[in-house]
Image: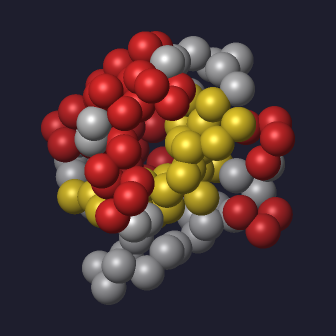
Amino acid sequence: MDYEYINQSAKRKYESEKSMQKEYGKAIAEGMNKFLQAVYSAKNAYDIKSLPTFFMEHLKGNLKEYYSVSLDKKKSKWRLMIQMLDENNRGITPTSNENLFLKSVTKIRIGKLSEHYAEF
């Protein structure tokens, strides 16, 4: 599966385990590394959703184009926002059949990592 980052700053931070550990702790740093490996190995977004490790969930309201992913455990305060992209790298909103929609998505944008209950 293909992916891009919301910006170069996110790319540098998320791909540096040292930087991640310093800012978010060891569990989140390891979780980010596992998530990036899972995305790299996945055929589509459904493959990521199918992994219980990340507790991927669709967001609502003004964030309806996004999903959140937990990097260490379901009740973690930290969530990574990801966006499904079409073939022109534009964000797309899920259809009523979410599983079919996710099976059609082959590229995501990795967004910001934030405290779930403070931001959403």
Q: Is residue 79 above or below residue 108?
A: above
Q: Residue furthest bottom?
A: 88
**Horizontally, is 115 left or right of 83 in the view?**
right
Residue 37 position in % (x across, y down)? 22, 33
- Please report the residue visible at 70 percent of the width from the left and 17 percent of the height from the top: 75
**Residue drawn at x 66%, y 20% as measured from the top left:** 76
Rendered location of residue 25, percent (x, y): 49, 18
Q: Nearer the viewer, residue 48 or 24?
A: 24
Residue 10: percent from left, percent from top: 40, 54
Residue 35 seen anywhere in this rendered image of the structure? no
Q: Residue furthest left?
A: 41
Say whether residue 94 is visible. Answer: yes
**Residue 53, quarter of the rendered image:** top left
Residue 74 located left or right of residue 24: right
- Residue 42, given in percent of the width and then of the height, sits at 23, 41
Query: Residue 78, located in which quarter of the rendered image?
Result: top right
Count numbered badges in the picture.
Answer: 0
- Location of residue 13 with respect to 35 vertically, above or below: below
Q: Quadrant of residue 60?
A: bottom right
Task: Tell me the residue at 33%/64% (across/down).
Answer: 8
Residue 93 located left or right of residue 63: left
Give 7 or 108, whichever is nearer the viewer.
7
Q: How is the protein colored in the picture?
A: secondary structure
Q: Is residue 104 above or below residue 1?
A: below
Task: Report whether 15 appears left or right of 58.
Answer: left
